[in-house]
Image (cartoon, rainbow, N blue to C red):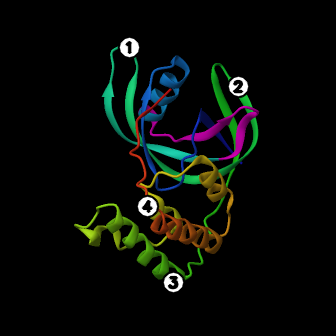
Amino acid sequence: MSRLPLFPLNLILLPYEVLPLHIFENRYKVMVKNAIEYDTPFGIILNEKKGIYSKGCKVKITKVFKEYENGEYDILVKGMDRFNVIDTNMDGDTIFGEVEFILPDAKPDLLLINKIQDAYLKVLIKYGVDNNLDHYMNKKISYDFLSGIQLPIELKKALIDLDVETERLNFINQIFNNILKSSTKPSNGHTHEA
């Protein structure tokens, strides 16, 4: 088990996903400052009405866009590893989780990956991404296919709960097929604040 500072938000972040954040609350300013100074991760976890969700994602700060004089930050984080929350406790104003990291399932189904790659490229083309497609061709893991695609929280909860890579790949294939059948475009993302 590991001890990880937790950042409850009204979202789920998945591995490989990037998220811009504006940090303004004192407790999170301290957490982010420590993460920058000591190059340490923290966890992003869904904040629900009944408390925090049982699974989250360890993140690493990949870019500091701006550090304000009052200690606020504009940062970019990237999802790394999923974890189960075993227990939580407070240390000052910061929530810490006793977490157990979920090891990735290292048995890729290459036929299924190729099938999803095809659906993924069709989704990209449907929404106007038709140049530099080579950049999108080397996806090898389920979560990498979702990088940059906005999904509802319920779908992300289902994805973060799936521990078997083949099950995630099948679920993502179903999502892509539903997107291809739909006539609407997904909305653009926005910076989240805390």
Label 4 with label 1: CB-CB less than 8 Å: no
Q: Which residue is mark 3?
A: 110
Q: Which residue is mark 4?
A: 183
Q: Which mark is residue 70?
A: 1
Rounded to the nearest angstrom, the CA distance separating label 2 from label 1 is 24 Å
Rounded to the nearest angstrom, the CA distance separating label 4 from label 1 is 45 Å
The correct choice, above or below, for 26 with respect to 179 in the image is: above
- Nearer the N terminus, badge 2 or badge 4? 2
Looking at this view, is 139 or 116 the one in front? 116
Q: Secondary structure at mark 1?
A: loop
- Nearer the N terminus, badge 2 or badge 1? 1
Q: Amino acid at mark 3?
A: Leu
Q: Amino acid at mark 1?
A: Asn
Q: Which residue is mark 2?
A: 90
Q: Amino acid at mark 4?
A: Ser
Q: Residue, x 52% and y 42% (percent of image)?
A: 41
